[in-house]
Image (cartoon, helix red, strand yellow):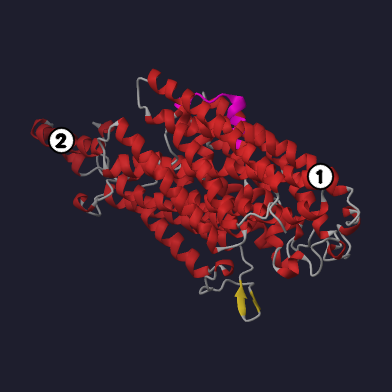
Amino acid sequence: MALNIPGVIAVVVFYLLILGTGVWAAQKSRKAERKCRGDRTEVVLLGDRNINLVVGTFTMTATWVGGGFILGIAEAVYNPNLGLIWALMPIQYSVSFIFGGLFFAKPMRDKMYITMMDPFQQRYGKILSGVLVLPALLVDVLWVSCTLLGLGATMTVILDLPFSISVWISSCIAIVYTLLGGLYSVAYTDVIQLSLIFVSLWLCVPFLMVNPKSVDIALTAFNYTYQSPWVGTLEAESVWKWMDDFLMLALGSVSFQSFHQRTLSASSSETAKLTCFISAIIIAVLGIPPVLVGAIAASTDWNQTEYGLPSPYIRGDHSLVLPLTLQYLTPPYISIIGIGAVAAAVMSSTDSGLLSATTIFSSNIYKAILRKRASDREMKWVIRVTVIVVGLTGTCMTFYTNSTLLLWILGADVSYTLIFPHLVSVLFFKVTNGYGAFLGYLVGLTLRILVGENTVGLPVILRLPGGTLEDGVYVQKAPVRTITMLCTLLTILLSSFLAAFMFKRGLLPEKCDIFKVKSPVEVAQEEETDRQGVALEPMLPEEFRLAKSLPSLYSYSHL
């Protein structure tokens, strides 16, 4: 196959449009910085907390509708072992946005946090919260890698560009405009990108639906034609695993920094909540085209196409099913439009991942721990360097796997099992303290490693009931992620309560209280009370002194 010159030209035009929008938004960011009288890093990281409802909705939705979203849904629907029943990402993300809007957006925005890790630092201190930052950084790097992998695969199939060139060019473009304008550039380019995603995806669908090489998807939904029905099946033994996957994406997504960056940058708490609710509707609509692509691919006689037999699944190309379907089942100009949709989706998520990881590192590690007195100028350079490092790291990781779905699920797994229980406990349970957080982190990480993860080659050591042996490998059927999450949450709360009880009752000496369960105010109040009690003791009548020493025999009421 020769290089697709018209497609390359179209992609270049698209990239220039995005880069131009990013440069324009960067100028807007600089104007806001000059007017800002407070912390100028908030202008870069949070858009001066002045993102309106329209732009906020665009950037919130575009962040989640990335390469992993589009290619991952199509891959799951097409995969005979999964099907639509296992590809409910649009519904899961809608639930996530609604859940986040109801419970997280207002308290986080009202307290004017910069990142979702700020409440951790306030409650646990800077060192322990610095350890908890690591999973959040890993999630964002995986996010960047996942989205770039989707774009590289698509360009390789349709444009016949080398995978590495496609990935590196796209990564560099995203890094450049994120460097220039921070959240302003990311948010305003998301407006262009989401518009292109919506138009391009829905424009491709009619051509795919009427192509003569595929049969009616209604016929193949529940009947075996060229492969298993694309709706998929849910066996009784897999119900718990299905629920586990659903909750992982529905709840785990709330503990992504990218989500909170959008709510924290909103112009008000009400705007933050409305942004979540409106985005929940739009993302469900945008999930329909990739579902249809996967269904059409499963309903296609690939022997009638230039791709030929065996099918993409048998060849191991199921992760490329969306670009393959566009390439072989639509006219060339339509497949180029589809490339635009995927490119837009990838860029909109890549820049968000870059900025998210940068925000956490610069604010919660560099500023809070390494350089507490760093100037605004120094912080701007830290932000720039971090964007480049995260971008390069995420880009390099794309060359170690060929499945966007795998990276997508892995990032959500870390977020759900390790970050989500800590976020819930620190925001909604006052008893939470550093001891509970530390033990919860250890228990959660240890348990998650022990129950294993076959998709990444992590062997199962702790076999939970209900599992089966498949080709000599033990496969967990229990909801291992949810069990890990709940164990982490319970460990945090119970350990926090026990530690607070022992220190406040004097069962453990205060000098051992490294996480300061007893606040300085409480300690000062107790010392003042003790001093006053000692000073007033000789002045009390004898009856009062007896009543104080023998409370079970005396009370003030009978004197």
Residue at 66%, 32% (x, y): give it. Answer: 278
Residue found at the far left of this picture:
538
Residue 86 in the magenta stretch? The answer is no
Q: Is residue 8 left or right of residue 522?
A: right
User: Which amino acid is tagged 2?
Assistant: Gly
Name the spot of residue 209 as percent of width and height, x first.
86, 48
Provide the residue span drawn in magenta: 48-60
The quarter holding residue 408 reads: bottom right
Please give the label number shown on residue 243.
none
**Placement of 127 over or under 99, stated as above or below:** below
Residue at 47%, 24% (x, y): give it. Answer: 27
The foreground one among 251 and 429 is: 251
Q: Is residue 250 left or right of residue 304?
A: left
**Mark 2 nearby-residue class (10 Å; few <14, some 14–19, many ≥20):** few
Q: Which residue is mark 2?
A: 533
Residue 55 in the magenta stretch? The answer is yes
The foreground one among 479 and 249 is: 249
The reply to whether residue 252 is in sight is yes
The reply to whether residue 230 is in sight is no
Residue found at the far bottom of this picture:
472
Q: Nearer the viewer, mark 1 or mark 2?
A: 1
Q: Quadrant of the C terminus?
A: top left
Secondary structure of the residue carrying numbered label 1: helix
Q: Which residue is mark 1?
A: 205
